[in-house]
Amino acid sequence: MRPVSAQAAAPQLVLQTDNGPIDLSQLRGQVVYVDFWASWCGPCRKSFPWLNDMQARYGKDGLKIVAINLDKDRAQAERFLEDYAPRFTIAFDPQANSARAFVVKGMPSSYLIDRNGNVVHAHVGFRKKDTEAMEARIRSLLQH
């Protein structure tokens, strides 16, 4: 499989959340930020406060953040979530089917999906210095 890259249609996935299944294709019309994470991922711990901030700032404008946990042991993910209190959608995929569909190469990995369901940006890792550029991409997509 080739990695999902910019300008490719986002994989069609149904993800499990505590509030029931979420179908990525049903999120068309919104700008979707898909983030793959795991409890053991150090940079993921730094990304969650930023993700909370982005959802708070831009959720009303149509941003939907979906963070997909890949831990095989749900209890480890739950302990992480107790510490980082996400205010965005958390999905659980212990079999990593969604990661295979996106061909995730590292943790965390994020994919920005436009209102038409196309991946317009893919990024591996989380560095504070990259957040301004990512926020600018989000703002630009929300304006279109």
Image (cartoon, grey):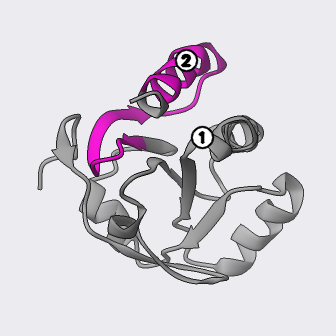
Judged left or right of residue 129, residue 99 is left
**In this picture, residue 70 sits left or right of residue 87:** left
Q: Residues within 10 Å of mark 1 (few under 14, many from 20)?
A: some
In front here: 87 or 4?
87
Secondary structure beneath dot 2 equals helix
Classify mark 1: helix, strand or loop. Answer: helix
Q: Is residue 115 magenta?
A: yes
The answer, for residue 133, to whether it is visible in the render is yes
Question: Mark 2 or mark 1: which comes first in sequence?
Answer: 1
Q: x and y percent of residue 20 in the render?
A: 58, 86
- Where does the C terminus fall, quadrant-wise? top left
Which label sits on residue 61?
Answer: 1
The magenta-colored residue range is: 111-140
Q: Is residue 99 left or right of residue 48?
A: left
Query: Which quadrant would residue 79 be assigned to in this image?
Result: bottom right
Q: Neighbour class for label 2 at 10 Å: few (<14), some, many (≥20)? A: few
Identity, as a three-letter code, of the amino acid under mark 1: Asp
View extreme (bottom): residue? 20
Q: With respect to residue 107, does 126 lie above or below?
A: above
In the picture, the disc for residue 130 is 2
Measured in 3D between alpha carbons, the distance from the residue under mark 2 to the one under mark 1, in whole angstroms, is 22 Å
Residue occupying image coordinates x 60% and y 21%: 131
Name the kind of residue labelled 2 in the image: Asp
Q: Is residue 23 above or below residue 108?
A: below
Image point 84% across, 57% down: which residue? 85
Q: Nearer the viewer, residue 57 or 128?
A: 57
